Image (cartoon, grey):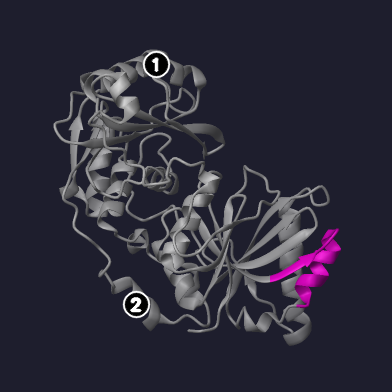
Protein backbone atom coordinates (compact mmCIF):
# COMPACT_ATOMS: atom_id res chain seq x y z
CA UNK A 1 0.00 0.00 0.00
CA UNK A 2 2.81 2.45 0.80
CA UNK A 3 5.06 1.55 -2.16
CA UNK A 4 4.78 4.59 -4.41
CA UNK A 5 5.77 4.69 -8.07
CA UNK A 6 5.61 6.91 -11.11
CA UNK A 7 2.61 6.82 -13.45
CA UNK A 8 1.56 8.57 -16.65
CA UNK A 9 -2.04 9.40 -17.59
CA UNK A 10 -2.49 9.92 -21.34
CA UNK A 11 -5.16 12.28 -22.68
CA UNK A 12 -6.10 14.44 -25.67
CA UNK A 13 -4.39 17.74 -26.37
CA UNK A 14 -6.27 20.52 -24.61
CA UNK A 15 -7.50 18.35 -21.73
CA UNK A 16 -4.21 18.21 -19.78
CA UNK A 17 -5.20 20.81 -17.15
CA UNK A 18 -8.59 19.18 -16.57
CA UNK A 19 -6.94 15.78 -16.13
CA UNK A 20 -4.38 17.27 -13.73
CA UNK A 21 -7.18 18.70 -11.59
CA UNK A 22 -8.94 15.32 -11.59
CA UNK A 23 -5.73 13.64 -10.40
CA UNK A 24 -5.16 16.20 -7.67
CA UNK A 25 -8.74 15.78 -6.42
CA UNK A 26 -8.20 12.01 -6.48
CA UNK A 27 -5.21 12.39 -4.15
CA UNK A 28 -2.33 11.85 -6.59
CA UNK A 29 1.10 13.29 -5.78
CA UNK A 30 3.80 14.91 -7.94
CA UNK A 31 1.31 15.97 -10.61
CA UNK A 32 3.11 17.41 -13.66
CA UNK A 33 1.49 18.43 -16.93
CA UNK A 34 3.05 17.57 -20.28
CA UNK A 35 1.84 17.48 -23.87
CA UNK A 36 -1.15 15.15 -24.06
CA UNK A 37 -0.17 13.55 -20.76
CA UNK A 38 0.02 14.15 -17.02
CA UNK A 39 2.59 12.37 -14.88
CA UNK A 40 1.91 11.64 -11.22
CA UNK A 41 2.85 9.26 -8.43
CA UNK A 42 0.94 7.01 -6.09
CA UNK A 43 0.56 3.45 -4.88
CA UNK A 44 -1.27 0.47 -6.34
CA UNK A 45 -4.58 1.71 -4.99
CA UNK A 46 -4.06 5.04 -6.75
CA UNK A 47 -3.38 3.20 -10.02
CA UNK A 48 -6.66 1.33 -9.64
CA UNK A 49 -8.50 4.56 -8.78
CA UNK A 50 -6.98 6.41 -11.73
CA UNK A 51 -8.25 3.77 -14.16
CA UNK A 52 -11.64 3.50 -12.50
CA UNK A 53 -12.42 7.14 -11.67
CA UNK A 54 -10.70 9.46 -14.17
CA UNK A 55 -13.02 10.85 -16.81
CA UNK A 56 -10.44 12.55 -19.05
CA UNK A 57 -7.69 9.89 -19.18
CA UNK A 58 -7.24 7.60 -22.19
CA UNK A 59 -4.93 5.15 -20.42
CA UNK A 60 -2.72 4.85 -17.34
CA UNK A 61 0.89 3.78 -17.87
CA UNK A 62 3.36 2.51 -15.25
CA UNK A 63 6.92 3.23 -16.45
CA UNK A 64 9.40 0.37 -16.10
CA UNK A 65 12.51 2.06 -17.47
CA UNK A 66 13.70 5.42 -18.81
CA UNK A 67 16.70 5.41 -21.14
CA UNK A 68 18.24 7.09 -24.18
CA UNK A 69 18.85 5.38 -27.52
CA UNK A 70 19.99 6.61 -30.91
CA UNK A 71 19.02 3.54 -32.91
CA UNK A 72 17.00 0.35 -32.78
CA UNK A 73 19.96 -1.78 -31.68
CA UNK A 74 20.42 0.40 -28.59
CA UNK A 75 16.71 0.03 -27.80
CA UNK A 76 17.11 -3.74 -28.10
CA UNK A 77 20.08 -3.83 -25.69
CA UNK A 78 18.37 -1.65 -23.09
CA UNK A 79 15.17 -3.71 -23.17
CA UNK A 80 17.13 -6.96 -22.85
CA UNK A 81 18.71 -5.76 -19.57
CA UNK A 82 15.33 -5.81 -17.76
CA UNK A 83 14.52 -8.76 -15.48
CA UNK A 84 11.53 -9.87 -17.51
CA UNK A 85 10.68 -12.92 -15.39
CA UNK A 86 9.37 -10.46 -12.77
CA UNK A 87 6.98 -8.91 -15.30
CA UNK A 88 5.92 -11.68 -17.70
CA UNK A 89 5.42 -14.91 -15.80
CA UNK A 90 5.36 -18.37 -17.39
CA UNK A 91 2.42 -18.99 -19.68
CA UNK A 92 1.53 -15.30 -20.03
CA UNK A 93 1.15 -13.55 -23.38
CA UNK A 94 2.30 -10.03 -24.23
CA UNK A 95 2.06 -7.31 -26.86
CA UNK A 96 4.00 -4.10 -27.56
CA UNK A 97 2.56 -0.75 -28.61
CA UNK A 98 4.98 1.95 -29.85
CA UNK A 99 4.50 5.72 -29.99
CA UNK A 100 7.40 7.41 -31.78
CA UNK A 101 8.16 11.07 -32.45
CA UNK A 102 11.78 11.17 -33.49
CA UNK A 103 14.16 12.00 -36.32
CA UNK A 104 16.16 8.87 -35.45
CA UNK A 105 13.24 6.42 -35.37
CA UNK A 106 10.88 6.74 -38.31
CA UNK A 107 8.72 3.61 -37.99
CA UNK A 108 6.86 2.78 -34.78
CA UNK A 109 6.18 -0.82 -35.88
CA UNK A 110 9.89 -1.48 -36.32
CA UNK A 111 10.51 -0.20 -32.78
CA UNK A 112 7.80 -2.49 -31.39
CA UNK A 113 9.36 -5.45 -33.23
CA UNK A 114 12.79 -4.73 -31.67
CA UNK A 115 11.25 -4.57 -28.18
CA UNK A 116 9.42 -7.84 -28.81
CA UNK A 117 12.61 -9.50 -30.10
CA UNK A 118 14.58 -8.36 -27.04
CA UNK A 119 11.99 -9.87 -24.67
CA UNK A 120 11.74 -13.14 -26.60
CA UNK A 121 15.55 -13.47 -26.82
CA UNK A 122 15.86 -12.76 -23.09
CA UNK A 123 13.60 -15.68 -22.20
CA UNK A 124 15.05 -18.00 -24.86
CA UNK A 125 18.58 -17.49 -23.51
CA UNK A 126 17.55 -17.68 -19.86
CA UNK A 127 14.96 -20.49 -19.86
CA UNK A 128 15.04 -22.05 -23.31
CA UNK A 129 11.38 -21.14 -23.86
CA UNK A 130 9.70 -18.01 -25.13
CA UNK A 131 6.46 -16.23 -24.21
CA UNK A 132 3.78 -15.86 -26.87
CA UNK A 133 2.89 -12.58 -28.52
CA UNK A 134 -0.84 -11.90 -28.71
CA UNK A 135 -2.13 -8.75 -30.38
CA UNK A 136 -5.68 -8.97 -29.01
CA UNK A 137 -6.17 -8.96 -25.24
CA UNK A 138 -2.68 -10.00 -24.13
CA UNK A 139 -1.94 -10.71 -20.47
CA UNK A 140 0.74 -7.99 -20.43
CA UNK A 141 0.53 -4.92 -22.66
CA UNK A 142 3.73 -2.87 -22.99
CA UNK A 143 4.10 0.68 -24.28
CA UNK A 144 7.35 2.12 -25.67
CA UNK A 145 7.36 5.89 -26.09
CA UNK A 146 10.22 7.63 -27.92
CA UNK A 147 10.64 11.41 -28.15
CA UNK A 148 13.79 12.04 -30.18
CA UNK A 149 16.30 9.86 -28.25
CA UNK A 150 14.45 9.75 -24.92
CA UNK A 151 12.73 6.41 -24.41
CA UNK A 152 10.21 5.27 -21.81
CA UNK A 153 9.07 1.66 -21.54
CA UNK A 154 5.85 1.25 -19.57
CA UNK A 155 3.28 -1.29 -18.52
CA UNK A 156 -0.17 -0.34 -19.81
CA UNK A 157 -2.48 -0.80 -16.82
CA UNK A 158 -5.67 0.06 -18.74
CA UNK A 159 -5.73 -2.22 -21.76
CA UNK A 160 -8.57 -1.05 -23.97
CA UNK A 161 -8.71 2.76 -24.14
CA UNK A 162 -10.52 4.26 -21.15
CA UNK A 163 -12.83 6.23 -23.44
CA UNK A 164 -14.55 2.91 -24.08
CA UNK A 165 -16.69 3.17 -20.98
CA UNK A 166 -18.84 0.16 -21.77
CA UNK A 167 -22.27 1.79 -21.86
CA UNK A 168 -22.40 2.61 -25.59
CA UNK A 169 -24.70 0.12 -27.31
CA UNK A 170 -24.75 1.82 -30.70
CA UNK A 171 -23.46 5.05 -32.18
CA UNK A 172 -24.41 7.53 -34.87
CA UNK A 173 -21.88 8.45 -37.56
CA UNK A 174 -18.79 10.16 -36.05
CA UNK A 175 -19.85 9.99 -32.37
CA UNK A 176 -18.17 12.33 -29.90
CA UNK A 177 -15.43 10.62 -27.88
CA UNK A 178 -16.49 10.03 -24.28
CA UNK A 179 -13.25 11.43 -22.83
CA UNK A 180 -13.60 14.61 -24.89
CA UNK A 181 -17.27 14.98 -23.89
CA UNK A 182 -16.42 14.62 -20.20
CA UNK A 183 -13.54 17.09 -20.55
CA UNK A 184 -15.81 19.66 -22.19
CA UNK A 185 -18.34 19.39 -19.37
CA UNK A 186 -15.70 19.63 -16.65
CA UNK A 187 -14.23 22.74 -18.34
CA UNK A 188 -17.55 24.57 -17.87
CA UNK A 189 -17.42 23.87 -14.10
CA UNK A 190 -20.95 22.47 -14.27
CA UNK A 191 -21.38 19.72 -11.71
CA UNK A 192 -25.17 19.38 -11.69
CA UNK A 193 -26.13 22.72 -10.12
CA UNK A 194 -28.83 23.39 -12.76
CA UNK A 195 -30.41 21.88 -15.87
CA UNK A 196 -28.16 21.00 -18.81
CA UNK A 197 -29.26 21.07 -22.45
CA UNK A 198 -27.77 19.47 -25.56
CA UNK A 199 -29.97 20.45 -28.53
CA UNK A 200 -28.02 18.27 -31.00
CA UNK A 201 -27.22 15.22 -28.87
CA UNK A 202 -26.65 12.52 -31.51
CA UNK A 203 -26.21 9.18 -29.72
CA UNK A 204 -26.24 10.95 -26.36
CA UNK A 205 -22.59 11.09 -25.27
CA UNK A 206 -22.71 14.57 -23.70
CA UNK A 207 -25.97 13.91 -21.78
CA UNK A 208 -24.66 10.57 -20.45
CA UNK A 209 -21.30 11.96 -19.36
CA UNK A 210 -23.12 14.92 -17.77
CA UNK A 211 -25.40 12.60 -15.79
CA UNK A 212 -22.41 10.58 -14.55
CA UNK A 213 -20.66 13.79 -13.49
CA UNK A 214 -23.79 15.19 -11.79
CA UNK A 215 -24.23 11.99 -9.77
CA UNK A 216 -20.45 11.47 -9.38
CA UNK A 217 -20.67 7.94 -10.77
CA UNK A 218 -17.24 6.57 -11.70
CA UNK A 219 -16.96 5.97 -15.48
CA UNK A 220 -15.13 2.67 -14.91
CA UNK A 221 -18.18 1.01 -13.38
CA UNK A 222 -19.38 -0.07 -16.85
CA UNK A 223 -16.08 -1.60 -17.99
CA UNK A 224 -15.69 -5.35 -18.29
CA UNK A 225 -12.07 -5.23 -17.21
CA UNK A 226 -8.70 -3.51 -17.00
CA UNK A 227 -5.26 -4.78 -18.01
CA UNK A 228 -3.95 -4.66 -14.43
CA UNK A 229 -6.40 -7.42 -13.47
CA UNK A 230 -4.15 -9.87 -15.37
CA UNK A 231 -0.95 -8.80 -13.60
CA UNK A 232 0.76 -11.19 -11.19
CA UNK A 233 0.45 -8.71 -8.30
CA UNK A 234 -3.24 -7.92 -8.86
CA UNK A 235 -5.03 -7.34 -5.54
CA UNK A 236 -8.62 -8.43 -6.22
CA UNK A 237 -9.80 -7.58 -2.71
CA UNK A 238 -8.50 -4.01 -3.01
CA UNK A 239 -10.11 -3.53 -6.41
CA UNK A 240 -13.42 -5.08 -5.34
CA UNK A 241 -13.57 -2.64 -2.43
CA UNK A 242 -13.05 0.28 -4.83
CA UNK A 243 -15.54 -1.07 -7.36
CA UNK A 244 -18.31 -1.58 -4.78
CA UNK A 245 -17.80 1.71 -2.94
CA UNK A 246 -20.58 4.11 -4.00
CA UNK A 247 -20.28 6.41 -0.98
CA UNK A 248 -19.12 9.34 -3.14
CA UNK A 249 -22.21 9.23 -5.38
CA UNK A 250 -24.71 12.03 -4.89
CA UNK A 251 -28.29 12.94 -5.84
CA UNK A 252 -29.06 15.08 -8.89
CA UNK A 253 -31.90 17.53 -8.34
CA UNK A 254 -32.20 18.84 -11.91
CA UNK A 255 -32.67 17.42 -15.41
CA UNK A 256 -30.66 16.97 -18.59
CA UNK A 257 -32.51 17.74 -21.83
CA UNK A 258 -31.36 15.96 -24.98
CA UNK A 259 -32.76 16.84 -28.41
CA UNK A 260 -31.98 15.71 -31.96
CA UNK A 261 -33.80 15.86 -35.29
CA UNK A 262 -32.87 12.29 -36.27
CA UNK A 263 -35.25 9.46 -35.28
CA UNK A 264 -32.37 6.98 -35.62
CA UNK A 265 -30.16 9.06 -33.30
CA UNK A 266 -32.98 9.25 -30.75
CA UNK A 267 -33.43 5.49 -30.89
CA UNK A 268 -29.71 4.91 -30.34
CA UNK A 269 -29.57 7.51 -27.54
CA UNK A 270 -32.46 5.76 -25.78
CA UNK A 271 -30.55 2.46 -25.75
CA UNK A 272 -27.39 4.17 -24.49
CA UNK A 273 -29.20 6.04 -21.71
CA UNK A 274 -30.68 2.77 -20.45
CA UNK A 275 -27.32 0.98 -20.63
CA UNK A 276 -25.72 3.75 -18.56
CA UNK A 277 -28.58 3.70 -16.04
CA UNK A 278 -29.28 7.42 -16.41
CA UNK A 279 -32.64 7.40 -18.22
CA UNK A 280 -34.39 8.96 -15.22
CA UNK A 281 -32.10 11.98 -15.36
CA UNK A 282 -32.46 12.69 -19.09
CA UNK A 283 -35.47 13.96 -21.03
CA UNK A 284 -35.07 12.94 -24.67
CA UNK A 285 -37.10 14.52 -27.46
CA UNK A 286 -37.16 14.39 -31.26
CA UNK A 287 -36.76 18.08 -32.06
CA UNK A 288 -34.72 20.14 -34.54
CA UNK A 289 -32.73 23.14 -33.29
CA UNK A 290 -35.17 25.41 -35.19
CA UNK A 291 -37.87 24.48 -32.66
CA UNK A 292 -35.77 25.13 -29.55
CA UNK A 293 -37.86 27.25 -27.16
CA UNK A 294 -36.98 29.25 -24.06
CA UNK A 295 -36.20 26.99 -21.13
CA UNK A 296 -38.23 27.65 -18.01
CA UNK A 297 -35.42 27.09 -15.49
CA UNK A 298 -31.80 28.18 -15.23
CA UNK A 299 -29.70 26.03 -17.58
CA UNK A 300 -26.37 25.59 -19.31
CA UNK A 301 -26.03 24.41 -22.91
CA UNK A 302 -23.17 22.18 -24.09
CA UNK A 303 -23.32 20.90 -27.64
CA UNK A 304 -21.30 19.61 -30.60
CA UNK A 305 -23.04 20.56 -33.89
CA UNK A 306 -22.05 19.06 -37.26
CA UNK A 307 -18.88 20.57 -38.82
CA UNK A 308 -19.40 19.49 -42.40
CA UNK A 309 -16.37 17.18 -42.20
CA UNK A 310 -17.43 13.69 -41.13
CA UNK A 311 -21.13 14.60 -40.91
CA UNK A 312 -22.68 16.50 -43.81
CA UNK A 313 -25.74 18.73 -43.75
CA UNK A 314 -27.59 20.44 -46.59
CA UNK A 315 -27.04 23.96 -45.26
CA UNK A 316 -24.17 24.00 -42.75
CA UNK A 317 -23.86 27.78 -42.46
CA UNK A 318 -27.62 28.10 -42.23
CA UNK A 319 -27.60 25.67 -39.31
CA UNK A 320 -25.17 27.88 -37.40
CA UNK A 321 -27.29 30.95 -38.18
CA UNK A 322 -30.22 29.15 -36.57
CA UNK A 323 -28.08 28.26 -33.53
CA UNK A 324 -27.18 31.93 -33.05
CA UNK A 325 -30.77 33.08 -33.53
CA UNK A 326 -32.10 30.55 -31.03
CA UNK A 327 -29.43 31.44 -28.46
CA UNK A 328 -30.28 35.13 -28.71
CA UNK A 329 -34.03 34.72 -28.53
CA UNK A 330 -34.56 31.57 -26.47
CA UNK A 331 -31.58 31.26 -24.13
CA UNK A 332 -31.06 34.71 -22.63
CA UNK A 333 -29.73 34.81 -19.08
CA UNK A 334 -27.86 31.53 -19.56
CA UNK A 335 -24.50 30.22 -20.80
CA UNK A 336 -23.87 28.13 -23.92
CA UNK A 337 -20.71 26.20 -24.86
CA UNK A 338 -20.25 25.07 -28.46
CA UNK A 339 -17.56 22.82 -29.94
CA UNK A 340 -16.97 23.33 -33.65
CA UNK A 341 -14.29 23.35 -36.31
CA UNK A 342 -14.73 26.05 -38.94
CA UNK A 343 -14.35 29.78 -38.29
CA UNK A 344 -17.03 30.50 -40.87
CA UNK A 345 -19.46 28.40 -38.84
CA UNK A 346 -18.74 30.31 -35.64
CA UNK A 347 -19.11 33.58 -37.57
CA UNK A 348 -22.66 32.63 -38.53
CA UNK A 349 -23.62 32.40 -34.86
CA UNK A 350 -23.22 36.18 -34.70
CA UNK A 351 -22.26 36.35 -31.02
CA UNK A 352 -19.01 37.34 -29.38
CA UNK A 353 -17.57 34.44 -27.36
CA UNK A 354 -16.53 35.05 -23.75
CA UNK A 355 -13.89 32.32 -23.99
CA UNK A 356 -12.17 30.19 -26.64
CA UNK A 357 -10.42 26.90 -25.87
CA UNK A 358 -8.42 24.88 -28.41
CA UNK A 359 -9.43 21.22 -28.43
CA UNK A 360 -8.85 18.31 -30.80
CA UNK A 361 -11.77 16.20 -31.94
CA UNK A 362 -9.86 13.36 -33.52
CA UNK A 363 -7.42 14.98 -35.95
CA UNK A 364 -9.53 18.15 -36.24
CA UNK A 365 -8.24 21.22 -34.41
CA UNK A 366 -11.48 22.61 -33.00
CA UNK A 367 -12.53 25.39 -30.65
CA UNK A 368 -14.77 25.14 -27.63
CA UNK A 369 -16.42 28.54 -27.30
CA UNK A 370 -18.36 30.00 -24.41
CA UNK A 371 -21.29 32.37 -25.02
CA UNK A 372 -22.87 34.35 -22.21
CA UNK A 373 -26.40 35.25 -23.22
CA UNK A 374 -27.30 38.32 -21.17
CA UNK A 375 -30.84 39.39 -20.36
CA UNK A 376 -31.70 43.05 -20.07
CA UNK A 377 -29.48 45.87 -21.34
CA UNK A 378 -25.85 45.37 -22.36
CA UNK A 379 -24.75 48.17 -20.03
CA UNK A 380 -26.31 46.39 -17.05
CA UNK A 381 -24.74 43.09 -18.10
CA UNK A 382 -21.23 44.58 -18.27
CA UNK A 383 -21.65 46.25 -14.88
CA UNK A 384 -22.88 43.02 -13.32
CA UNK A 385 -26.42 44.31 -12.88
CA UNK A 386 -28.19 41.72 -15.03
CA UNK A 387 -29.71 38.54 -13.63
CA UNK A 388 -27.03 36.29 -15.08
CA UNK A 389 -25.32 33.72 -12.86
CA UNK A 390 -22.02 32.63 -14.38
CA UNK A 391 -21.05 28.98 -14.01
CA UNK A 392 -17.33 29.73 -13.79
CA UNK A 393 -15.88 29.32 -10.33
CA UNK A 394 -13.92 32.19 -8.84
CA UNK A 395 -10.71 32.51 -10.82
CA UNK A 396 -12.12 30.29 -13.56
CA UNK A 397 -11.86 32.92 -16.29
CA UNK A 398 -8.08 33.01 -16.02
CA UNK A 399 -6.20 31.38 -18.91
CA UNK A 400 -6.32 27.63 -18.48
CA UNK A 401 -2.59 27.32 -17.94
CA UNK A 402 -2.79 29.66 -14.93
CA UNK A 403 -5.66 27.92 -13.18
CA UNK A 404 -5.17 27.54 -9.45
CA UNK A 405 -5.37 23.97 -8.25
CA UNK A 406 -6.62 23.00 -4.78
CA UNK A 407 -4.17 21.71 -2.14
CA UNK A 408 -1.37 20.73 -4.53
CA UNK A 409 0.13 22.53 -7.51
CA UNK A 410 0.56 20.97 -10.92
CA UNK A 411 3.82 21.83 -12.65
CA UNK A 412 3.87 22.28 -16.41
CA UNK A 413 6.48 20.35 -18.38
CA UNK A 414 5.95 20.32 -22.14
CA UNK A 415 7.54 17.58 -24.20
CA UNK A 416 7.78 17.16 -27.95
CA UNK A 417 5.21 14.65 -29.06
CA UNK A 418 3.20 13.99 -32.19
CA UNK A 419 -0.27 15.50 -31.77
CA UNK A 420 -1.86 12.81 -33.90
CA UNK A 421 -0.70 9.92 -31.72
CA UNK A 422 -2.18 8.74 -28.47
Q: Which residues lie in the magenta part?
A: 65-81
Q: Is residue 124 left or right of residue 220?
A: right
* Position of residue 213 measured from the top left corner of the image (x, y, whole percent): 31, 53
Total numbered labels: 2
* Position of residue 287 measured from the top left corner of the image (x, y, whole percent): 21, 26
> How far is disc 1 from disc 2 in space, using C-alphas?
52 Å
Please tell me which residue lies in front, 303 or 120.
Answer: 303
**Could you classify mark 1 by the number of other residues whose Cα lies within 10 Å: few (under 14), some (14-19), or many (20 or more)?**
some
* Position of residue 378 measured from the top left corner of the image (x, y, whole percent): 31, 20
* Position of residue 221 measured from the top left corner of the image (x, y, whole percent): 33, 63
**Could you classify mark 2 by the number of other residues whose Cα lies within 10 Å: few (under 14), some (14-19), or many (20 or more)?**
few
- Contact check, label 1 and label 2, Cβ < 8 Å: no
Q: Is residue 369 left or right of residue 149?
A: left
Residue 77: in magenta span: yes
Residue drawn 80% across the image and 64% down it: 68
Question: Which structural element holds mark 1?
Answer: loop
Q: Residue furthest bottom?
A: 127
Is residue 252 in view?
yes
Q: Quadrant of residue 139?
A: bottom right
Label 1, on which residue?
A: 350
Residue drawn 53% across the image and 82% down it: 232
Please tell me which residue lies in front, 319 or 116.
Answer: 319
Residue drawn 18% across the image and 32% down it: 285
Q: Quadrant of residue 90?
A: bottom right
Q: Nearer the viewer, mark 1 or mark 2?
A: 1
Mark nearer the N terminus (1 vs 2): 2
Q: Is residue 67 left or right of residue 200?
A: right
Label 2, on which residue?
A: 240
Question: Which structural element holds mark 2?
Answer: helix
Above or below 137: residue 147: above
Above or below 402: residue 384: above
Residue drawn 58% across the image and 50% down it: 36
Amino acid sequence: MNDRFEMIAKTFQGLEAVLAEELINLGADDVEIGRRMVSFSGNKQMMYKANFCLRTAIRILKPIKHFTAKNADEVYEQIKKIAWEDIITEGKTFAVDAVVFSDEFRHSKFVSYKVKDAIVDYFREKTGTRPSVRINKPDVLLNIHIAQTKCTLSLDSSGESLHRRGYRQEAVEAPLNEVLAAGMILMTDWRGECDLIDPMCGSGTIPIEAALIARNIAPGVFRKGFAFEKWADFDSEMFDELYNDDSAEKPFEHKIYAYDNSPKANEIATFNFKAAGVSKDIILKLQPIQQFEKHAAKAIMITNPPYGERISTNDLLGLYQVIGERLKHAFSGNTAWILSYRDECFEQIGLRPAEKIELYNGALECQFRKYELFSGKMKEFKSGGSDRKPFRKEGGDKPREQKEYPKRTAKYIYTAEDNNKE
